[in-house]
Structure formats: structure tokens, C-alpha cells
Image (cartoon, grey):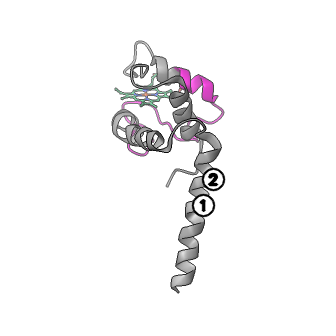
Amino acid sequence: MPDLRARLVGGFISLIALGSGAFAEGIPEARTAELEHMLIQDCGSCHGLTMKGGLGSPLTPDALDGADADTLAYIILEGVPGTAMPSWRPLLSESEALWIAQYLLKSEHQE
Ligand code: HEC
């Protein structure tokens, strides 16, 4: 049933487009791809490849339940003094940190 498959794939792609358009405003798509890569490579080294935690605390939507995106963005930018959580200010703008915070709070990207 190649037809059905094509429709499923098409539906999936429009879902992704919808999903990212809603919260990635102002950040070019090429940059959001880099941010996702960074989350896995850099954040993942402490928080786990699937954000379930490791040296760093779990960052799944469940674990962050109720957290406020602005607060998370602030933590990402400033780090947590006295812990292994570094400041990402040299690498991220405020809107990028907010994008990451909102990304972490969304459950759709989770497998
Ligand atoms: C070197 C290890 C390390 C790396 C790399 C790292 N973190 Fe962390 N992170 C931590 C630790 C440890 C904590 C817990 C700090 C504490 O005890 O409050 C933390 C806490 C956090 C929190 C707060 C979680 C909460 O429940 O309040 C967020 C959000 C966060 N990190 C996001 C990120 C993001 C996004 C990246 C990548 C850009 C990243 N971290 C990279 C170690 C790391």
C-alpha cells in the first residue's frame, strides 16, 4: 500500500512543520537543527541522550512538570553555581535558550 505510506509520511512532515512553527519563531530552521544537535551532544553528555538524567538532572517534560520556560531559559543561560551545570551564555542567545526550554517542555519530540 504505497499510497497509505506516502500519506502517513506526508502527515508526519506537516505535523513537524506545525509543531516547530509554533514555538521556533524568529530562529532560522538551520539554527534550530544546530540547537537540537547541541542538546544531544552537549547537554546529553550530562543529562543523558534522551534527557532522562545522568550527572545532570532529568530534563524530560515529566521531570520538568510545571517548570516555567523563562526560568529554565535563565538556568540554561546562567548555569547553576556550585554544580556541574555550566553557563551557556557564550554559546546561546536569550531567544535560543528560551527555544531550548520550550523544546524540553514539549513532549512531542520524545520517542
Ligand atoms: C557538565 C554537565 C552538564 C552539562 C554539559 C549540562 N548540564 Fe544542565 N545541569 C547539570 C547539573 C548537574 C544540573 C543540576 C544542578 C542542580 O543541582 O540544581 C543541571 C541542571 C539543568 C537544568 C535545571 C533542571 C531543573 O529541574 O531545574 C536545566 C534546564 C539544564 N540543566 C539544561 C541544560 C541544557 C539545555 C544544557 C545544554 C545546553 C545543559 N543543561 C548542559 C549538568 C550539566
The quadrant in which residue 70 appears is top right
Rendering coords of residue 53 (x, y %): 42, 37
Q: Is residue 99 left or right of residue 41?
A: right
- Residue 69 rendering spot, x and y as whole percentages: 61, 29
Q: Would residue 53 be counted in the magenta stretch?
A: yes
Q: Between residue 24 and residue 45, name the one nearer to us.
A: 24
Q: Which residue is mark 2?
A: 18
The amino acid type, in three-letter code, at marker 2 is: Leu
Residue 78 to residue 57: above or below:
above
For image coordinates 55% across by 40% down, the residue present is 103
Instruction: Tell me the SS state at disc 1.
Output: helix
Q: Residue furthest top?
A: 82
Which residues are drawn in magenta?
48-74
Percent coordinates x, y for residue 83 in the rendering: 39, 18
Considering the whole magenta stretch, tell me its main secondary structure.
loop
Image quarter of residue 84: top left
Say which residue appears at 56% left-offset and 64% top-offset: 12
